[in-house]
Image (cartoon, grey):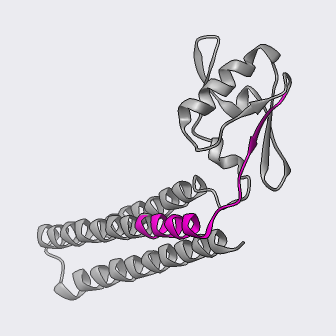
């Protein structure tokens, strides 16, 4: 039963990691190069991550600069950024592509916080579903093995404690990102 518990706790950890990954995609008025993580550029017929076709830097708090290794890739990189619909139009000077992030309005910040809370709720639902599946597996394994009821109850309690711990971590992560977005 311990391996069942460990497997489900690992799934909860993955749910938390997934939430953190989704939150890095939300921009908080500052230039965050992670917003480009999912963008693939057509590099001579091969979809290649943007970070592998040029140098991505943040020269100023609200600007991301992309300097391609190969100057002929400027148009392809611009096209990939436009296709990704990140809400920023790229500009280029023939050598470097710049993404300038506008200041967020108060209304836009509040909308982003709502989105963040929705992502947090989805993560908590996923964690609770993992708990439910884990409880079912523990009960089933306990019956198959003929384990004492108090031993089964101990594993169920351990799974519930893990669930509470991860739900709390989700709340903390959501609060931290919401505070970051609301900071002017």
Q: Nearer the viewer, residue 67 or 133?
A: 67
> At 58% from the left edge and 52% from the top edge, which residue is drawn?
25
Looking at the rendering, which quadrant does residue 70 occupy? Answer: top right
Query: What percent of the width, then of the height, locates residue 118?
Result: 41, 66
Q: Quadrant of the N terminus?
A: bottom left
Marks counted in the figure total 0
> At 63% from the left edge and 47% from the top edge, which residue is drawn?
35
Q: Is residue 2 visible?
A: no
> At 46% from the left edge and 58% from the top edge, which residue is drawn?
14
Q: Is residue 93 above or below residue 99?
A: above
Q: Is residue 39 above or below residue 7?
A: above
Residue 138 left/right relative to 33? left
Question: Magenta segment, which residues?
Answer: 96-118
Query: What percent of the width, then of the height, locates residue 23?
Result: 55, 59
> At 30% from the left edge and 65% from the top edge, which residue is drawn?
130
Residue 80 left/right relative to 138? right
Q: Is residue 64 magenta?
A: no
Q: Nearer the viewer, residue 162 or 102?
A: 102
Residue 20 left/right relative to 183? left
């Amino acid at each position: 039963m311990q391996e069942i518990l460990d497997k489900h706790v690992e799934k909860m950890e993955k749910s938390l990691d997934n939430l953190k990954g989704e939150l890095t995609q939300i921009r908080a008025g500052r230039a965050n190069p992670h917003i480009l993580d999912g963008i693939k550029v057509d590099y001579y017929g091969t979809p290649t991550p943007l970070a592998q076709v040029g140098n991505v830097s943040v020269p100023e708090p609200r600007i991301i600069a992309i300097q391609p290794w190969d100057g002929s890739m400027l148009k392809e990189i611009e096209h990939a950024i436009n296709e990704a619909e990140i809400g920023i139009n790229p500009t280029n000077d023939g050598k470097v592509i710049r993404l300038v992030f506008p200041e967020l309005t108060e209304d836009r910040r509040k909308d982003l916080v709502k989105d963040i809370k929705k992502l947090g709720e989805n993560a908590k639902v996923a964690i609770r579903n993992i708990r439910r599946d884990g409880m079912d597996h523990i009960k089933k394994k306990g019956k198959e093995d003929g384990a004492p009821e108090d031993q089964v109850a101990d594993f169920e309690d351990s799974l519930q404690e893990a669930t509470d711990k991860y739900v709390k971590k989700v709340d903390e992560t959501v609060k931290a990102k919401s505070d970051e977005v609301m900071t002017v």
